Image: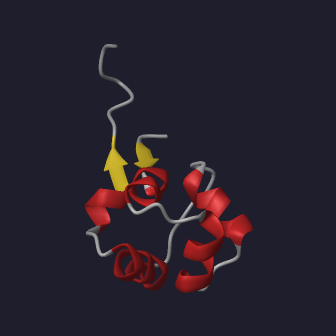
Amino acid sequence: MPIVVRIDVELAKRKLSVGDFAEQVGLTPANVAVLKNGRAKAVRFSTLDAMCRVLECQPGDLLEWVDDDAPA
């Protein structure tokens, strides 16, 4: 999938656990894991807004597009 989720990087920068992050955002730790591991098929804007508010970042800090067709 060409969209890479970088939640783990932002959590590490802030030394924030998945459990604490999930609680502050209003998600279950299992749903954060689905997002963090790139298994999510979609993200609601309200969830993205909450994640950015908690992490004090921009959506582009959490999501990155990677070209699957680019030579390695």
- Colour style of the rendered protein structure: secondary structure
Give the image location of residue 50, x and y in percent: 44, 83
Q: Is residue 51 above or below residue 39?
A: below
- Which residue is located at x 62 percent, y 82 percent? 23
Q: In this view, does 23 lie to the left or right of 57?
A: right
Write down the quadrant of residue 28 in the picture: bottom right
Q: In this view, does 51 lie to the left or right of 25?
A: left
- Residue farthest to the top, as pictured: 72
For this rendering, which residue is in front, 66 or 52?
52
- Residue farthest to the front, as pictured: 15
Q: How many labels does the image show?
A: 0
Give the image location of residue 13, x and y in percent: 37, 56
Q: In this view, does 55 lie above or below 7?
A: below
Give the image location of residue 8, x and y in percent: 49, 52
Q: Is residue 38 above or below residue 52?
A: above
Write down the quadrant of residue 49 in the picture: bottom left
Give the image location of residue 5, x and y in percent: 45, 52
- Which residue is located at x 45 percent, y 85 percent? 46
| Quadrant (top left, top right, bottom left, bottom right) of the C terminus | top left
Write down the quadrant of residue 17 in the picture: bottom right
- Which residue is located at x 31 percent, y 14 percent? 71
- Which residue is located at x 70 percent, y 69 percent? 29
Q: Is residue 29 left or right of residue 69?
A: right
